[in-house]
Image: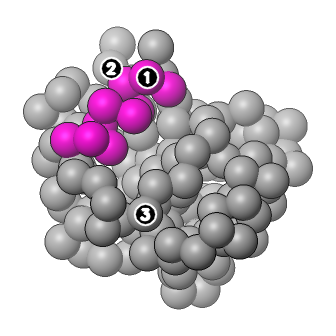
């Protein structure tokens, strides 16, 4: 059975690129363009990992991360933050909230992101 990855990203081009790259690698993808939709998906699906943007409409990534880490059903799902926020304070905050990794979008290719997911979902 293929592993499911929830991608929470409002930038359509990046969302499609990640979905395509993950599909080629044999992953099933779930997609949400804001934190509220992502929470709705988590009510019916249990992904193996989550790729999370921080700057999102309706509910930002910080709030989403706090909600899933405080929920018994979702707290153990590994989260990789993928954001344009490159300052050290944001990166430290993401790890404090429970993210396994924090990647700055401009510093990684989609292939490198997929490698991170492979390591996380072994």
Q: Is residue 116 magenta?
A: yes
Q: Quadrant of the N terminus?
A: top left
Along the line of sight, which residue is nearer the eye, 100 or 31? Answer: 100
Q: Measuring 38% from the left and 48% from the top, which residue is drawn there?
A: 30
SS of the residue at dot 2?
A: loop
Q: Please give left or right for residue 102 compared with residue 96 in the image.
A: left
Q: Which residues are magenta?
A: 111-120
Q: Earlier in the sequence, mark 2 or mark 3?
A: 2
Q: Measuring 20% from the left and 41% from the top, which residue is drawn there?
A: 111
SS of the residue at dot 1?
A: helix
Residue tagged by mark 3?
104
Q: How packed is label 1: few (under 14 Cα within 10 Å), some, or many (20 or more)?
A: few
Q: Earlier in the sequence, mark 1 or mark 3?
A: 3
Q: CA distance from mark 1 to mark 3?
A: 18 Å
Question: Is residue 34 positioned above or below 4 on the image?
Answer: below
Q: Which mark is residue 2?
A: 2
Q: Is residue 46 magenta?
A: no
Q: Which percent across, then down, holds residue 49? A: 51, 37
Q: Which percent across, then down, holds residue 52? A: 51, 59
Question: Is residue 69 positioned above or below 32 on the image?
Answer: above
Q: Which percent across, then down, holds residue 56? A: 52, 80
Q: Measuring 32% from the left and 60% from the top, which residue is drawn there?
A: 107
Q: How packed is label 2: few (under 14 Cα within 10 Å), some, or many (20 or more)?
A: few
For the residues carrying marks 1 and 3, which lies nearer the camera in this image?
A: 3
Residue tagged by mark 1?
119
Q: CA distance from mark 2 to mark 3?
A: 27 Å
For the residues carrying marks 2 and 1, which lies nearer the camera in this image?
A: 1
**Magenta-colored segment: predominant secondary structure:** helix
């Amino acid at each position: 059975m293929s592993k499911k990855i929830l991608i929470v990203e409002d930038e359509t081009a990046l969302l499609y690129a990640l979905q395509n790259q993950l599909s080629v690698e044999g992953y099933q993808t779930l997609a949400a363009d804001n934190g509220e939709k992502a929470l709705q998906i988590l009510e019916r699906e249990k992904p193996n990992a989550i790729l999370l943007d921080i700057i999102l409409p309706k509910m930002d990534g910080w709030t989403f991360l706090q909600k899933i880490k405080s929920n018994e059903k979702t707290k153990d799902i590994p989260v990789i933050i993928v954001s344009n926020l490159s300052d050290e304070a944001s990166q430290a905050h993401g790890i404090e909230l429970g993210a396994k990794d924090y990647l700055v979008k401009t510093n990684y290719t989609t292939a490198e992101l997929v490698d991170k997911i492979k390591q996380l979902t072994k």
